[in-house]
Image: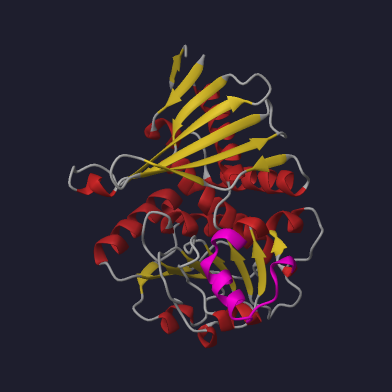
Amino acid sequence: MALILSQNEVKQCVSMVDAIAAMRTAFQALAEGHALISQRSAAPLIGDGVALLMPSLLRTQTPPSFVVKCITVVPENFSRQLPLTSATMLLLDAETGQALAVLSAGWPTAMRTGAVSGLATDLMARPDADILALFGAGGQAPFQAVAIHAVRPLREIRIVNRNPDHFNRCCQTIQALIGPGCPPIKHVALSAEALRGASLVACATTASSPLFAASEVEPGTHINAIGAFTPEMCELDAELLQQARIVVDQREAALAEAGDLLQALARDLIPAADTWTELGELLTGQSLTRLQPEDITVFKSVGLAVQDAAIAQLIYQRAREQNLGVNVEL
């Protein structure tokens, strides 16, 4: 029997603290060779639509899990008054090949994307970091703030974006997810104002040029950058990357998709990829985190399928415990 889970049911299953713990397990498994992932593959749909497929195997779970996430992007849906993107996860028992669950993937993707930034912040940021400059107010932005707050309790969140409606929605989502302990949130027009005194930065945009100058970043700052996920995109200044300690989710994935790093590499402004640290190497002790309090650290993530395997399995287990979803014989 497979469990079918709607988005509303998925939302009831996992807290951000749970999701961060799941990412810790997933990235340690990846570093230790207990997880297998493939790069995204794309297949055309009718018209201009495309389907993106992300498979992964995670051996450390019980049962071992195999997950395929399918994300569709259909530009024509705007005129149909339908969502431009949708996402679904299929969870299989990796030993038997039997389907365990089919679940709406929008919320799990946002949670796991935020959670890996939370994990990186926990490992890399200064213990006293408590002001966040958040660039972007789209769908991923609130989850960045919530995850960072889970590991470094914030006393202020500063959001830099251009659309007032997006800012308001972002604020409402952050406040709803954090609850009564939510810190003050304010809109800031200029990057320099947002970064002044901020020792935490999160970038969640679709920018094609740097969001701020290297000179605006204060010593000791930790930066999570999740937005530039194609070679043409860029959120971080190459001069900043020259100064920073770079950690990536996976070197192979970053070399394929991380526009910030690829553009800096092409100009010979940063060291070769084999010098970058992978997040899992921080967990296994293969690499140190922050060497000096004044170090600038950057975590660059393009998103890995192993994150989907970890979050999907956790949601499935919690849903079973809470009697959520509908069981279907496939």
**Residue 269 x %, y %:** 63, 82
Asked if the magenta segment contains residue 63, the reply would be no
Residue 126 to residue 248: above or below: below
Side (left or right) of 90 relative to 65: left
Q: Quadrant of residue 120?
A: bottom right
**Residue 223 x %, y %:** 57, 70
Residue 65 to residue 140: above or below: above
Side (left or right) of 299 relative to 14: right
Q: Quadrant of residue 12?
A: top left
Question: Start and end of the magenta stretch?
Answer: 255-274
- Residue at the extreme top of the image, as rendered: 329
**Residue 5 x %, y %:** 43, 27
- Residue at the extreme right of the image, as rendered: 286
**Residue 88 x %, y %:** 43, 35
Asked if the magenta segment contains residue 261, the reply would be yes
Side (left or right) of 159 relative to 247: left
